[in-house]
Image (cartoon, grey):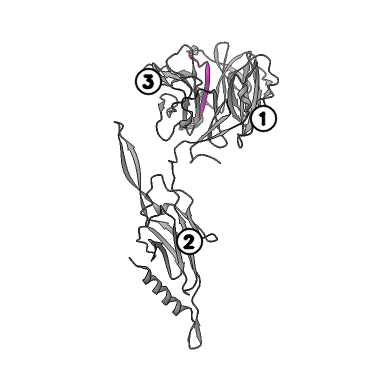
Amino acid sequence: MRKLISIVFSLLSISLIFTSCLKNDDEETTYSSECVITSYSLGTLNKYRTVTASDGSDSIVKDTVTGSNYKFTIDQRNLTIYNTDSLPVGTDISKVVAKISATGYAVTFTRNDSILTFSSTDSLDYTKQLQFTVHANDGLASKTYTVKLNVHQTYTDSLMWSKSTVSNFPASQLESMKSVYNNGKIIVLGIKNGALVMTEASSDNTDSWSALATANGISGTADINNIVTFGGKIYIVAGKQMYASENGKDWTAVEGSNNVSRLLATSSYEMFGVIDGNFASYSNGEWVVSGNTDIENLPETCVAFSSKKMKHNATMEKVVLTGINESNDSCGVVWNKVSAEQAYARQDWSYLPVEYINVYALPRLANLSVLSYNGELYAFGGAGKMRSTSIDALSGLYISGDEGITWKKQTKKTTLPEEIEGVTQDFTAVVDQKHNAILIIFKNGNIWRGFIPEIYIK
């Protein structure tokens, strides 16, 4: 290692030689005072991750990270160097080889109270702040840059949670509630004294909610188990009449929809419901009635749905319908169907009666919430069971990646916040589509926002 005395001697020699102008045949040579770092890059780094074996035991696996894939910004004004794309979780930055290009005579850094000249073969510890000084050819000027290596502290596919609390939350007065996202608003609808009421907040600011407002234009008792969004509007059923609203407060009866007993789901092309005990679909202002096979197994409460374009054809969507049917006391129920732009390609509803042979069936949970997020289905809820196995309230997040066939409880990365485990407070859940985030809205005003960093839109 090169010690302090050698570098000081070298710099002193440079200063004595280069600060003067040499004269030869009336020609002067002036040495530059320019001293800037022009590029910075990393070599190969080690990354460590934990792998769980089939027997539940964990082991550490070492991988490598190609550091040159991570571009660095050089802020010449503030003399800082940093990577905007963070290195992966588990990257070891205690032994890092870097390459620095600079204008000037030498680049130095300090380690253990010694000033050392930088070499691209040095393995340096970046767990502590490192500074590099560029010395100009004139032996006088210098600039010192601070380098920061940004490393993800959590996996980019992990579900991150944050909490806020709304004082005097209007929805705390509701007997039951359901939330929807529509036109940049989070709208909570519920029943108070037998009437449909609502409160809303901008998805940009869920700390500020409007006062409770009674819904206008609805005749009869509205059923919040029959709420869907379609084409920028919210739809609900009251006394077999379907109503539409853009804001959740002002409602209008939909012409030709005075015998709709239930609303089930929507796709990009259709809305689905029940008319006179039969399945029905709505598009272009008209209802079309189909069959009623297994219709007695439809979800009756905690109704939720998702619709996702099919990989092999962008004009077709797989619709998944979930919820609780009182006659099934072992698990939740799941239905699916194919919706399509072309009427001839549409398929009927299919009930998935797999609860007795599928060890990963949808659990039967109080206030069951099923959300479509990150290309998968997320299910969670209050206390319940899966067949004969009891499940505590909000003790697990169940994910289905196969359109509702299997639901597996997550134990790592994608989980509910630990703080809400066992909480029995009523809640409603919705996906904030503008920001790609999950909102769990508790009746007492506690709002949890969950998001995966790589898809979250700030």
Asked if residue 341 shows in the view, the reply is no
Of the numbered discs 2 and 1, the one sitting upstream in the chain is 2
> Mark 1 packing: few (<14 Cα in 10 Å), some, or many (20+)?
some
Residue at the extreme front: 113
**Vertical arrangement, residue 103 with respect to residue 300, above or below:** below
Kind of residue indicated by mark 3:
Asn
Mark 2 vs 3: CB contact within 8 A = no
Query: Which of 282/173 is in front?
Result: 173
- SS category of the residue bearing label 2: strand
Of the numbered discs 1 and 3, the one sitting upstream in the chain is 1
**Vertical arrangement, residue 72 with respect to residue 296, above or below:** below
Name the residue that disc number 1 marks: 210
> Measuring 44% from the left and 55% from the top, which residue is drawn there?
129
Q: CA distance from mark 1 to mark 3?
A: 44 Å
Kind of residue indicated by mark 2:
Tyr
Mark 2 vs 1: CB contact within 8 A = no
Quadrant containing the N terminus is bottom left
Name the side, left or right, on which 66 lies relative to 146. left
Extent of the magenta region: 297-307
Q: Nearer the viewer, mark 1 or mark 3?
A: 1
- SS category of the residue bearing label 1: loop
> Mark 3 packing: few (<14 Cα in 10 Å), some, or many (20+)?
few
Question: Is-magenta flag for residue 369?
Answer: no
Q: Which mark, residue 358?
A: 3
Name the residue that disc number 2 marks: 145
**Vertical arrangement, residue 61 with respect to residue 234, above or below:** below
> Measuring 37% from the left and 20% from the top, which residue is drawn there?
358
Expressed as whole percent of the image width and height from the top left, the position of residue 100 reads 42, 62
Q: CA distance from mark 2 to mark 3?
A: 59 Å
Asked if residue 422 shows in the view, the reply is yes
Expressed as whole percent of the image width and height from the top left, the position of residue 130 reads 43, 58
